[in-house]
Amino acid sequence: MERTLAIIKPDAVAGGHVGAILQRVESGGFALRGMRLVRLTRAEAEGFYAVHRDRPFFDSLTAFMSSGPAIVLALEADDAIRRWRELMGSTDPAKAAPGSLRREFGSSIERNATHGSDAPETAATELGYFFRGVELG
């Protein structure tokens, strides 16, 4: 079993897509091991996305991620990281596979409805960022 962090981003929360995304999580065979509603401060968003600090999109990304509530999830399944990334689809919703979350709920590369860890080491760090000191089921 493997764990990954998933985020339902502010655009998907504001758009009323939380229930539909959670239904896809469950029907996709993921076990929900933790869930929190968060409203990131700009500093928290900057800390989470620090790996992108030197990228041109860093300021707009952290402004967006701190613009409204988001849902952070700890998901568990066999091959969870790859499977969640497949369910999310390509970063660019226009290039994402039909039926993927980003194709269905995203509107741009930045406002693409969901986030997911890209490797086991990243997942461990990201889960610790949002679930530090929390026992995951």
Image (cartoon, grey):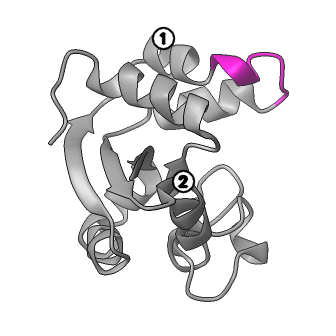
Please name whichever residue, 98 or 80, is drawn nearer the observer in this view of the structure: 80
Q: Which mark is residue 43?
A: 1
Q: For the view shown, which residue lies furthest in the bottom direction?
A: 98
- Magenta range is 50-56
On the image, the x and y values in percent for residue 105 come to 50, 72
From the image, tell me which residue sits under label 2: 81
Q: Is residue 54 magenta?
A: yes
Q: What residue is drawn where x is 39% and y is 18%?
A: 41
Q: Quadrant of the C terminus?
A: top left
Please name whichever residue, 129 or 66, is drawn nearer the observer in this view of the structure: 129
Q: What residue is drawn where x is 48% and y is 17%?
A: 42
On the image, the x and y values in percent for residue 48 come to 53, 22
The 10 Å Cα crowd at callout 2, few under 14, some 14 to 19, many 20 or more, is many
On the image, the x and y values in percent for residue 45 come to 50, 22
Query: Against 49, is 69 above or below?
Result: below
Q: What residue is drawn where x is 53% and y is 49%?
A: 115
SS category of the residue bearing label 1: helix
Please name whichever residue, 63 or 71, is drawn nearer the observer in this view of the structure: 71
Q: Is residue 97 magenta?
A: no
